[in-house]
Amino acid sequence: MYFRGREIIRPEIGMKVFEKIGQLLTGKFNIEQMPKLEGNHITMVIAPK
């Protein structure tokens, strides 16, 4: 997820989105890397079970 302009002021909203995605994918996918804020984007690595 990339933040543009003033969106970077509220990165916690983006982290909530990734938490919800993680909850939806439990059981079918493994989360290899938890969401991490790097500059103006958040990344999360998932893999199939």
Image (cartoon, helix red, strand yellow):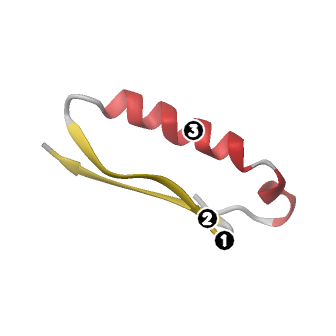
Residue 39's tag is 1
The spot of residue 9 in percent (x, y) is 83, 54
Q: Given the image, on which type of amino acid does mark 1 rest?
A: Gly
The N terminus, quarter of image: bottom right
Q: Given the image, on which type of amino acid does mark 3 rest?
A: Val
Left or right of 5 on screen, residue 20: left
Tell whether label 3 touches label 2 (CB within 8 Å). Answer: no
Mark 3 residue crowding within 10 angstroms, few (<14) / some (14–19) / many (20+): few
Q: Residue at image x 12%, y 42%?
A: 49
Mark 1 residue crowding within 10 angstroms, few (<14) / some (14–19) / many (20+): few
Q: Which residue is mark 2?
A: 41
Tell whether label 2 touches label 1 (CB within 8 Å). Answer: yes
Residue 20's tag is none
Q: Residue at image x 64%, y 45%?
A: 14
Judge depth for marks 1 and 3 and give the one in front.
1
Q: Is residue 6 above or below residue 40?
A: above
The spot of residue 8 in percent (x, y) is 78, 59
Q: Which residue is mark 3?
A: 17
Judge depth for marks 1 and 2 and give the one in front.
1
Left or right of 3 on screen, residue 47: left
Numbered disc 1: secondary structure: loop
Q: Given the image, on which type of amino acid does mark 2 rest?
A: His
Q: CA distance from mark 1 to mark 2?
A: 6 Å
Q: Is residue 43 above or below residue 15?
A: below
Q: Residue at image x 60%, y 36%?
A: 16
Q: Of label 1 and label 3, which has the lower sequence position?
A: 3
Q: CA distance from mark 1 to mark 3?
A: 18 Å
The spot of residue 15 in percent (x, y) is 60, 43
Q: Residue at image x 17%, y 47%?
A: 48
